[in-house]
Image (cartoon, rainbow, N blue to C red):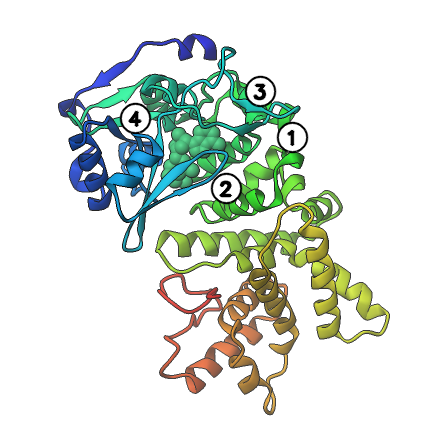
Amino acid sequence: MSNRERDSSKLTIIPRKHHKISRKSISEAALKVLYRLDKSGHRACLVGGGVRDLLLGKHPKDFDVATDATPEQIRQLFRNSRIIGRRFRLVHIRFGREIIEVATFRGHSNDTGRSELNTDGRIIRDNTFGDIEEDAIRRDFTINALYYDIRDFSILDYTNGLVDIESRTLRMIGDAEIRYQEDPVRMLRAIRFAGKLDFQIDRIASDAIFKCAPLLEGVPAARLFDEIVKLFHCGNASRVFILLRQFQLLKYLVPSLDNWINGDPDAEMLDFIDQSLVNTDARVNSQVHVSPAFIFAVLLWPVVQQRASQLCSNKMKIIAALDQAGGDIFTEQIKTVSIPRRYSQMAKDIWTSQPRFQRTKGKYPRKLIGYPSFRAAYDFMCIQSMVGLIPKEICSWWTDYQLKHKPIEATRPQSSGRPDHRRKRNSHAS
Ligand code: ATP
Ligand code: MG
């Protein structure tokens, strides 16, 4: 069946008794929003990741609501709300720490059925409202276009998304190339969902990635930062990394790392990246704090180290060399992905701490342990020792040292040289 035929498929309604989404698994805040919109005479459905993840038996990261109420109408119904976005106007409704994102059904903005585009075919504005069916076909993947209707708790499927949930397939709604042109970030979303959910990207959507990848060069650096963080904090960053390499997308995100990988990469260093991502995944999956700084510190480490050793051969001291190399690499990196200074600073602290772990005499250890980024730097060092980049004894020494010197603040660090994923606080903390 071609994508086009699939798009014209009719609505399938799955009544409550034939699906497994229970209101018990939907957050109270999301239910409150849905009920209030419904009571005020609006259509209101849960959509996107909330429905998809519940159908897959997973815990949704957040809940998105779609409605026929306009942003202004939503704003009036909820005092705790604010309108955000320009390209897509949305309403955020806040309940304590939880935010429910409410979007008005989108429609076609002109006779061609397309939104306002720039010369590359990229959507620059898309605020024309439509009905629920139009809204469904403007979403990215079929599995993201399932609606849970608060009126009767049924699921509405306009794009055959349920079949794709069953077969674990990521299929683009409509013509994949056009959809990537409209918004190249959809290519990264494909990688993220394939990685996170362990789905296969269907042939058409995969082939189009190879064709459209260069369009990522036109994506604003700030949006790429958000996407890169979502990619590496999705809970399956190790698979995401494999997919980014397989689809040759790394060069649009971390060009220096891509260059390094295409050279003659050191196996232990590759192993270090992989282990760090495994470590991050374990933390994300047990709701332990993670920081984008750690991800950038890991991804840029091979090139920072390479650059620093060149500087050292010109008689510069190692810490100064790492500091300068780190600064230079970030200057290049932020041309592609803008990285807030607090994260680049923390990554630099992690790097410049690494030689300091070698100094275990005198006042040095006490000083290092007091550094704000110590915990993240320590994890980073232990992963290096685990893969053989530095001697195992250094990690053990610091593990013991912390036991003796921080008996109250620090919970027991890992004894085996493996960072402990179960700790709920401390390392990676910014
Ligand atoms: P997550 O679990 O990461 O929240 P999600 O699918 O809910 O995944 P969101 O970014 O929260 O992703 O977006 C909510 C929904 O909005 C998506 O499921 C999709 O239907 C739609 N959407 C988001 N971004 C795009 C996009 N760039 N193009 C088309 N549809 C999009
Ligand atoms: Mg979501």
C-alpha separation, residue under disc 3 versus residue under disc 2: 24 Å
Q: Which residue is mark 4?
A: 68
Residue occupying image coordinates x 41% and y 12%: 7
Q: Which residue is mark 1?
A: 215
Going from N to C along the chain, the mark reached first, 3 or 1, is 3
Quadrant of the displayed image that contains ligand 1: top left
How many residues crowd mark 2 within 10 Å: few (<14), some (14–19), many (20+)?
many
Q: Residue furthest left?
A: 17
Going from N to C along the chain, the mark reached first, 3 or 4, is 4
Residue occupying image coordinates x 27% and y 55%: 96
How many residues crowd mark 1 within 10 Å: few (<14), some (14–19), many (20+)?
many
Callout 2: SS: helix
Q: Ligand 1 near label 3 (Cβ, under 8 Å)?
A: no
Q: Which mark is residue 177?
A: 3
Q: Whole-percent x and y of residue 102?
A: 33, 37
Q: Return the residue nearer the eye: 77 or 140.
A: 77
Q: Is residue 68 left or right of residue 83?
A: left
Residue occupying image coordinates x 42% and y 83%: 406
Q: Which residue is mark 2?
A: 239
Callout 3: SS: helix
C-alpha separation, residue under disc 1 versus residue under disc 4: 32 Å
Task: Determine the image quadrant of residue 161.
Answer: top left
